[in-house]
Image (cartoon, rainbow, N blue to C red):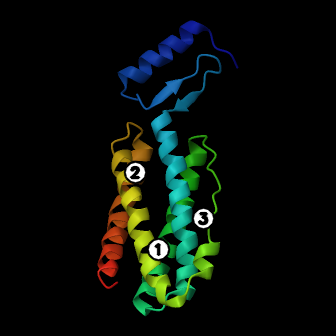
Amino acid sequence: MNYPHSFARRVLTLVAAFGLGALTLSAQTGTVELKRSDRHFLEKAAKASQAELQISQIATERAGNPQVREFAQMIVSEHQQLNRELTDLAAAKGVTLPVSAAKLDKWSAKKANEFDKDYVNEMVSQHDEAVSLFEKAVKSEDPEIAAFAQKYLPKLQAHHTAAKDFKKLY
């Protein structure tokens, strides 16, 4: 449905007046669009979380240290929940999330004696990036994205801390 240009201008004025700057209105379609930074957050968070989940699924079976296996299982459980909510949020925002597959062959081929150390190092690295990404998203002007990021930031920080603690063992 096409709206007259004056209608689009009025909606943009209302968007600005009510502090909804995270949204933009397409004058062509009359639809509300997500800011590029919020779209980027949703897409990057999905890729990162999927990679952590897939690698951790392998670690639940391959890790030699029972505590590392338990950590990997926690990552699997919590990232499955994060991914479900992220998918729902993205769908509500009209964003199609990328499907990414981590390079899992190298994880399946790792020798048992090096698997735990490499897995822990990967989780530290992955969570460095995830924590930074979610810290930025907490400041989003979109209240739903900010709330999602705020909900999961403490869990990601806890994962990061745990991974760094495991790293000290290797």
* Secondary structure of the residue carrying numbered label 1: helix
Please, what is the three-letter code of the amino acid marked with disc 1?
Answer: Ile
Look at 58% across and 80% down and name the residue there. Answer: 58
In the drawing, does residue 117 fall left or right of residue 52?
left
Please, what is the three-letter code of the amino acid marked with disc 2?
Answer: Leu
Dot 1 or dot 3, earlier in sequence:
1
Viewer-closest of 12 and 78: 78
From this viewpoint, is residue 143 visible?
yes
Alpha carbon separation for disc pair 1 and 2 = 18 Å
Q: Where is residue 127 in the image (x, y as percent from the top left)?
A: 40, 63
Q: In which quarter of the image is residue 170?
A: bottom left
Point out the residue furthest to the right here. Answer: 1
Q: On residue 149, which mark appears?
A: none
* Secondary structure of the residue carrying numbered label 3: loop
Q: On residue 133, which mark appears?
A: 2
Eye-nearest disc, 1 or 3: 3
Viewer-closest of 105 and 34: 105
Look at 55% across and 64% down and name the residue there. Answer: 51
Q: On residue 102, which mark appears?
A: 3
